[in-house]
Image (cartoon, coloured by chain):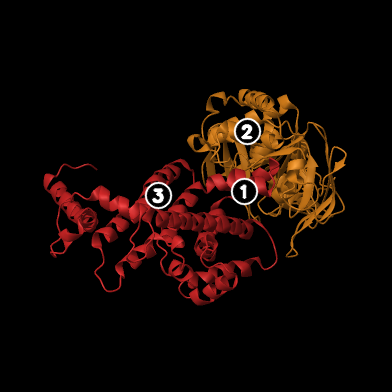
Amino acid sequence: MSTVTLKDLKKTYANGFQAIHGIDMEIRDGEFIVIVGPSGCGKSTLLRMIAGLETITDGELMIDDRRVNQVEPGKRDIAMVFQNYALYPHMSVYDNMAYGLKIRKKSTEEIAQQVNRAADILEIGALLDRKPSQLSGGQRQRVAMGRAIVRDPKVFLFDEPLSNLDAKLRVQMRIEIRKLQRALKTTAIYVTHDQVEAMTLADRLIVMNGGLPEQIGSPMELYDRPATTFVAGFIGSPAMNFIPVRVDKKGATFPSGQNLNFSVPSGHENVLLGIRPEDIEITTPDLADLTLKVSVIEPLGADSLIYGSCEGMKEDLVVRVRDKATVQEEETFSVRFNQQKLHYFDPTTNSRLP
Amino acid sequence: MVENRPLLTFFSHLALIIGISFIALPVWLAFVVSTQEASALFSGQVPLWPGEHFIENYSSILFEGEKNSGAPPILLMITNSLVMAICVAVGKITISIISAYAIVYFQFPFRQAIFWMIFMTLMLPVEVRILPTFEVIAQLGMLNSYAGLTIPLIASATATFLFRQFYMTIPDEMIEAARMDGAGPIRFFIDILLPLSRTNIAALFVILFIFGWNQYLWPLLVTTDASYYTVVMGIQRMMAVPDSDPIWHYVMATAILGMIPPVIVVVTMQKLFVKGLIETEK
C-alpha cells in the first residue's frame, strides 16, 4: 500500500542507447497501472528500473517518500512476477513461497502462517509439497503470484505474466489478478503488449512508444480521447481507421474527392480523420458519408469485420457490424460515421486536434 | 515397441555374455591368482578356480606389505590413495564451481580474458607441465606430503568450463527472482546454484575421483617416503623387484584391493546422479 513516484526517470545503456527518455508519473496508493506498448518501446526496461534490476541513469524513483534509486531490489519492499515464473526448480511450492521470508529471517510460525494464507487466497493449498516441474502452467503462474503476495509487499510488479499461458487460461488468470489486486489493495504495475489485458486490468494505462509515454490515463479516456495517432491505433481492436482529409476554401474532401458531410477543425490544410470500426455503420446510399467496396469479410461470431476499399486510399477501412455481414464480397456499400465519435489528428505531429 | 522374437533375444544375450566375459575374465583371473600359494603359480599354468589362501594372502598384504620390494602395507597405500583422490576431486569441484560462478555472474575487468586463460590450460595436461610443477613443489618443500600430492592437481579447466556452461543455461530470471527475494550473491550461490548443480557435482566427482585415484606419474615423482605411496604406484613397485620374479599372488591381491574404492564410488554415485537427472527440471 504505497505510492510510487517517477521523476524524469531516464535510462541510457552503456553502449549509448537511450531506452527511456524521461518519464514523470505519480502512482497512487492501491492503483493498478498497466504499461503497454509494442516490443522495444522500453516498457520492460521501465518496470525493471522500478524493480531495481536495471540501474537508473537519471531522475528519481520514490516508493512512498523514500528515494530508492540505489536500493537493492530485495530491500525495496516490492515483489515481482516474471514472464517465465522463475520458480526455483529444486524447491517445493512451499519453499518457493517461503524463501523470501526465510531470507528476511521471519520465524517459522510466521512463515507458515503467511504461506498458508497466500495458498488459501490462490487455492494452491493442495500443491504445497510439489515441485514446480510437477505443476501445470496455470498452477506455476499461481505459485509465482503466491511468492509475490506472501511477502505483503508495497508494490507488485508483473512482467507479462500471462504470455506463456493458453488463451482460455489467460482470460481466467486475468480476471483473478484483477480480483486479487482489488482484494489486497496493493499498488500494482503491470507490463503487457496485449491491449485487451491492458484495458481490462488498468486503473490507469501508460502507452509507451520509443522510450516515451505517449499518453497516461484511464482505459476509457485513452479509448475515447487518444492524444496521438499511436495511442489511437494501439488501443482498441481492430485498430482505428485513419483517413487523410484535405481542407480548402470550398470545404473538406476525402481522398476520393467526395465532400465530407461534417465540419473538421479549421486552420489545417491536411487533417487525419480517425474513426473506430465500431463507430461506422452500414446505411442507405442517401445517408452515406462514404461508399466502400468489400474486399474481405471476417465473421467473428458475435460480430463481423468488413474490410472495404475506397478510391484514393492505400489501406482498407474496417467496419464492425453486429451479427452476420449483410453484404457480399466485391459488393459496394454505403457507410455512415458516428459524428460523436470522430477523432482528428495533425498528420505532421500526429497529435490530437481539439 | 516390445516384440517377442526369441532368436533376437538369444543372440543379443549371447553378444552381451561374450562382451561381459571379455571384461570379467581378467578380473576373475586376478582374483584367482590372488588366492593361490606362491608355489601354485610356478608351473606356468594359471589355475581357474580360487585356491585356499585367500585370508592368509590378503591379511599379510593388507597389514604387513611386501618386504622384498619395500612396499608398505596395502591398507596404508589405500588410505593414501583415498586421501589423494578425495582431496583432488573435492578440491577441483570447489575451485572450479567458485571460479565458474565468478566468471558467469560477476562483471569485473578482463573477465573474458581470464576465462580464456583458464580455458587454455586445458591444453596442458599434468604430464606436460610436470617438470616445472615439480620444481615449484620442491622449492616449497612440499615433497612427501599430502599437500604436494594433491594441490598441483586441483586446478581444473575442464570442470570450470562444465560449470560455466551449466550456469549459462540457468535463466537470468532465476537470479533476478532471488534478488527480489532479498538473496545476496552468497545466498544465491548456496541456496539456488549449488542444489541445481547437484547432478553435475555428482558426475564430476565420479570422474575426478577416478582421475585422482589413477594418478601414477605425479605420486611417483613427489613421494620418496614409503608412507606416502599410493596403491597404483605400489603395484608398480611390487612388479619391478630386482633379481627375482614378482610375487604374483601379492600383486594381484593388491590390484583387486585397489579396484574396490573406485567401484564403490561409481556404484553409489551412479544412483545419486541418475536420481538427480530424473528429478531436476531442466
Reading the image, the residue beneath label 3 is B265
Name the residue located 81 percent from the left edge and 54 percent from the top edge: A10
Reading the image, the residue beneath label 2 is A97
Task: Look at discs 1 and 2 and give the one toward the viewer.
Answer: 1
Q: With A134 as the anchor, is B140 left or right in this view?
A: right
Q: With A254 as the anchor, is A58 left or right in this view?
A: right
Q: Closer to the camera, A270 or B43?
A: B43
- The C terminus of chain A sits in image quarter: top right
Q: Position of residue A253 (x, y in %)?
A: 75, 52
Name the residue located 59 percent from the left edge and 41 percent from the top edge: A85
Measure the C-alpha gap from mark 2 to mark 3.
36 Å
Instruction: Tell me, yes or no, if residue A339 can be seen here.
Output: no
**Residue type of the residue flagged with mark 1:** Phe
Q: Where is residue B273 in the image (x, y as percent from the top left)?
A: 43, 46
Reading the image, the residue beneath label 1 is B189
User: Disc 3: which chain?
Assistant: B
